[in-house]
Image (cartoon, rainbow, N blue to C red):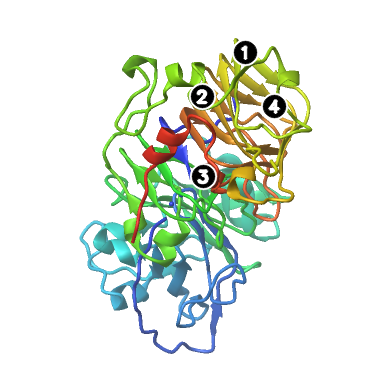
Amino acid sequence: MKNQRIITTFSLIFVIGTIFSVVLIFDSVKAVEVPIEGNIWSENIGWVSPNYNDSRFGPPSVDYSVLFDDENRNLAGYMWSDRVGWLCFGQSCVDAGLGSTPAIGGGSIPAVVRESGLIDSWAGWVTLGNDGWTDLLGDQILTGDFSNKVACRNCQGDSCGFCFENDDNNGSGYIYENCSGCSDLSCSLCQNKFQHGVGLDQIKNNLVGWAWNANNLGGSGFGWLHFDEDVEPKPYLQTVDGNVYSRIGINGESAPQGHYNATFMLQSGGSISKFYSEYEYTQNPDWKIENYDQLNLPDAENNYTSSISKIDFPGLYAGQYGEVSIIQNQAGLPSSTPLSGKVYYHQGDLSLYSSQYFRSGSGAVDGSGTVIVNGDLTVESNSFYLDTGLASWKNLPSVGFIVKGDLYISSNVTELSGNFYVEGTVYTGSSANQLVVNGIMVAKDFEFQRSYLQNKEPAEKIIYDKRIFMNIPPGFDDIAKGLPKWQF
């Protein structure tokens, strides 16, 4: 199976985000309280900061932290998410206005830290109100195997405070308490078993484990929250200076804290999750719209005419948009000279097997061109725009690809230039290399397969370079006119 991260049916790769604003007033704290450190990650909302010293976050208007009161063995305070706001603990949730917890009998429960280190309580996402309660210790389980547990914490001699079922992500699965026969952070026998849980590692002074928010394991919420001393985000997609539209829905990987999946508008005919817009977060939540009109691509079924745009194949083939050049392979595409405003047609599958350069025109020579592939297009090498000596926008190199099949991008490709209209699926290629696309991509489906993740940079980065409007490739007039436009 391919390393598939996001599939969006009819996605126009151009933007995304969420914004919540909560104003809180903090009480002073006692000197015996110690701020909690560590990393907290959610696949749905991204990074969560444990305190205001976290350099990955832009600090809010007040200092914040979650504090461990060693004398009374409880937690209180707030953590912060740039995307969804405050996460309260213990008495702080009462101060924030949350009501009764989902615990049996209701009432407010302080975040008590057991002697083992497990936290017997709830945290709360303030922005969700009473739907924000987050279970820090799941139901106790009385059956099953209590032996040979790993990733143990709070160990002294041959005993440890708590352990996990397995050591994935530094501790995952069931969580166990009061373990004995321990050596090298593994224990032969534990006493209590819970469905999930979060514990305080009192050596490193950070929280570890898993908490759940979905209205007491049933209903809406932000899902799993992973506490760890070393959590890494997953490879993600980023679009720059454009918008994103999906007919069915978008389900991606969140960008790391301080980064975004998109710049401007995000619209979907369905739901949007784990995909964030800079403008939605920093400007206005209206930059994300779910359950928007379901728009269809022009294709063979609708004679290449839809509510979005049309592709005039008869006009393209007849030379109404530019001289038509039949090519047999990549050698038919100019690489040392401009595209000259022509339409380049290839019957069947086409492979771009060597580096391709799209060069500026000069004088009256047009730098644009359109490539029609009546089959699949495979890109095996990088492609580049070379902008030199522009006398007018007409000289600007700008290429459009109309692909009647699928687009396959080889794993070694790191830079791809052009505006791509693909009737089928775009495959970015399984690779640890980053892929940068200069242009737009319109397709029925996408499979983002790159695994690159260095310095929090995206695995795939699509940069809307505006060439499609500054020098429209032949036959792309109606496509460009049909691209969604938003003004605020």
Q: Amino acid at mark 1?
A: Asp
Q: Amino acid at mark 3?
A: Glu
Task: Check disc 1: other Cα within 10 Å, few if <14, some if 14-19, many if 20+.
Answer: some
Determine whether the residue tagged by mark 2 lies in a helix, strand or loop.
Answer: strand
Residue in the foreground of this view, choosing between 288 and 94: 288
Residue 189 visible in the current orientation = no
Instruction: Answer left or right for 296 relative to 55.
Output: left
**Residue 160 locus on image (x, y percent):** 62, 56
Q: Is residue 190 above or below residue 154?
A: above
For the N terminus, give its image quadrant.
Answer: top right
Task: Check disc 3: other Cα within 10 Å, few if <14, some if 14-19, many if 20+.
Answer: many
Disc 3 marks which residue?
A: 253
Q: Earlier in the sequence, mark 1 or mark 4?
A: 1
Disc 4 marks which residue?
A: 410
Residue in the foreground of this view, choosing between 436 and 37: 436
Distance in Å between CA atoms under marks 3 and 2: 19 Å
Single out the residue that lies furthest toward the front: 364
Q: Residue at coordinates 46% horizontally, 69% vertically from top-left?
A: 80
Disc 2 marks which residue?
A: 425
Determine whether the residue tagged by mark 1 lies in a helix, strand or loop.
Answer: loop
Residue in the foreground of this view, choosing between 382 and 457: 382
Please identify, in this view, whether the residue under mark 1 or under mark 3 is nearer the observer: 1
